[in-house]
Amino acid sequence: MSVDPMTYEAQFFGFTPQTCMFRIYIAFQDYLFEVMQAVEQVILKKMEGIPGCDITPVQIRKCTEKFLCFMKGHFDNLFGKMEQLFLQMILRIPPNILLPEDKCQEMYPYSEEEFQLLQKEIKELQEKCKVEMYTKQALLAELEEQKIVEDKLKQTLTLFDELENVGRDHGTSDFRESLVSVVQNSRKLQDIRDNVEKESKRLKIS
């Protein structure tokens, strides 16, 4: 059998030419064995009809096996020549022929170095796409957070509007001024509390 992988032919046929020839060889060999078995059975029946025949079935088996080896040797020799002819003349794609899916290589030829550069560029573009995708996800997450903050701000403004309406209902003209006053008074109370705590601590120490 040929050791040439014939990968281009395998791309076209869907199987290697060597595999095809091997299957043909096995089929011929099986057929030869079947023929020898049939011939042996015919000889045995003929011998049964001959009176006083001294030839035994064992002798017939040895003769058919010997003839089978003879036939197999000649078959292997002929098949080797047939295989060489098939692999060189029939199942081989000429070197000047391109398959339809490889026509683009004829139109746009490139060297191994150019192929490596192209692979590198593709890899860089893939990395950039990943970065862009992660950036987009981060921006979408930030936008979602901004929507949440905006909703909370709207709720706060609504609360202030409601408080201002309540203040007006109870005679307060400006809610913002009232809120500033509350904050100032709260800070004064906090200062008084801090002073009381400091004085309490001082008295305990003394």
Image (cartoon, rainbow, N blue to C red):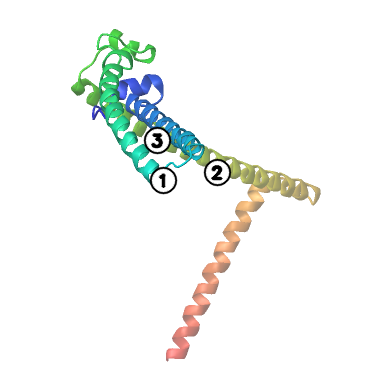
**Name of the residue lying farthest toward the bottom:** 206
- Residue 193, how many percent across, how many down? 54, 73
- Residue 19, how many percent across, how many down? 36, 29
Quarter of the picture containing the N terminus is: top left
User: Quadrant location of residue 173?
Assistant: top right
Q: Where 139 sits versus 16, above or below? A: below
Regarding mark 1 in the picture, which secondary structure is present there?
A: loop
- Residue 22, how many percent across, how many down? 35, 30
Quarter of the picture containing the C terminus is: bottom left
Q: Which comes sooner in the sequence, label 1 or label 2?
A: 1
The residue identified by callout 2 is 145
Instruction: Report the amino acid beneath label 1.
Output: Thr
- Residue 24, how many percent across, how many down? 39, 27
- The disc placed on residue 130 is 3
In the shown orientation, is residue 59 left or right of residue 170?
Answer: left
Q: Is residue 152 visible?
A: yes
